[in-house]
Image (cartoon, rainbow, N blue to C red):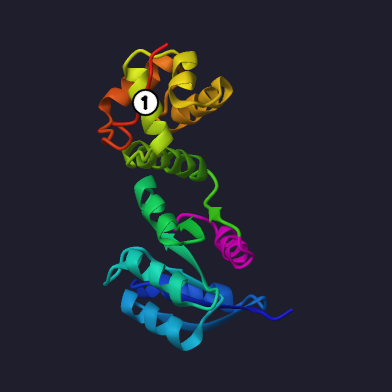
Amino acid sequence: MSPISIALVDDHPLMLSGVVSLFERNDDFVVVAKGTTADEALQINRDFFPNVMVLDLFMPGNVFDVISEIVRTSRGSKVVAFTAMTGSDYAVRALNAGASGYVLKGSSAEELIQGVRAAHCGETYITPGFACKVIEALRIASLRKAANAPIKLSLREEQIVRLLLRGYTNRQISVGLGIGEKTVKNYMTILMQKLHARNRLEVLIAAQKLEVDNRGENESISRH
């Protein structure tokens, strides 16, 4: 098996020297390049296309943008953030940018090696003991994103929402729109998911906050 090619970028000379020495002593790896800035990381990626890039988060340049650029333009290169920053928000930013690993500098040498191996295999690695904190932060960030995302309803869903706001029952909606009552129930399930509602009342409350356009407003609907 060919050794894993890696590049190491860190603006702390002693740290960089120590990490380079760590991987050079291991026959499973070959260090193809090293650097001290985010710009150098980009150039190394262009010149060497290492299997894994290990880089510090805080050094000259926008490291998060660099992570995204490396992942976007490389030939499958993986990125492992190696940092002293223990804030979960930094880990979330790095992972969202495309990093495959987040290893704290207080970790053991074996953990860093394990992180690089995992990234090379297409897995995500986070320093044990810190992982739960990061996973929870990712979950919260995902929920916030979903809550802030614009809700788009189909024409039929908008029609049903309008009738719900007028007090129509499922039966009345089915007759008014010329669709089966079971179909109405299916749409209600979809609306509950889209509006993050648990029941019909919460659908009504959420629907009142939506700016439903006037498409289909002139459609003839009879009340029964």
Quadrant location of the C terminus? top left
Q: Residue furthest bottom?
A: 47
Label 1: state its secondary structure: helix
Q: Given the image, on which type of amino acid does mark 1 rest?
A: Val
**Residue 75 shown left or right of residue 197 in the figure:** right
**Residue 223 shown left or right of residue 211 in the figure:** right
Q: Please tell me whether residue 145 is drawn above or below residue 118 in the rendered image.
A: above
The stretch drawn in magenta includes residue 185: no
| Residue 95 visible in the snapshot | yes
Q: Position of residue 9 (x, y in %)?
A: 41, 74
Quadrant location of the N terminus? bottom right
Q: Position of residue 215 (x, y in %)?
A: 30, 38
| Residue 204 visible in the snapshot | no
Q: Please tell me whether residue 76 is drawn above or below residue 168 in the rendered image.
A: below
Q: Position of residue 60 (x, y in %)?
A: 26, 72
Q: Position of residue 219 (x, y in %)?
A: 34, 31
Q: Residue at x 35, y 47 (%)?
A: 89
Dot 1 crowding, Cα within 10 Å, few <14, some 14–19, many 20+: many
Marks counted in the figure total 1
Q: Which residues are magenta?
A: 105-122
The stretch drawn in magenta includes residue 118: yes
Q: Residue at x 48, y 19 (%)?
A: 175
Residue under label 1, please give it. Answer: 161
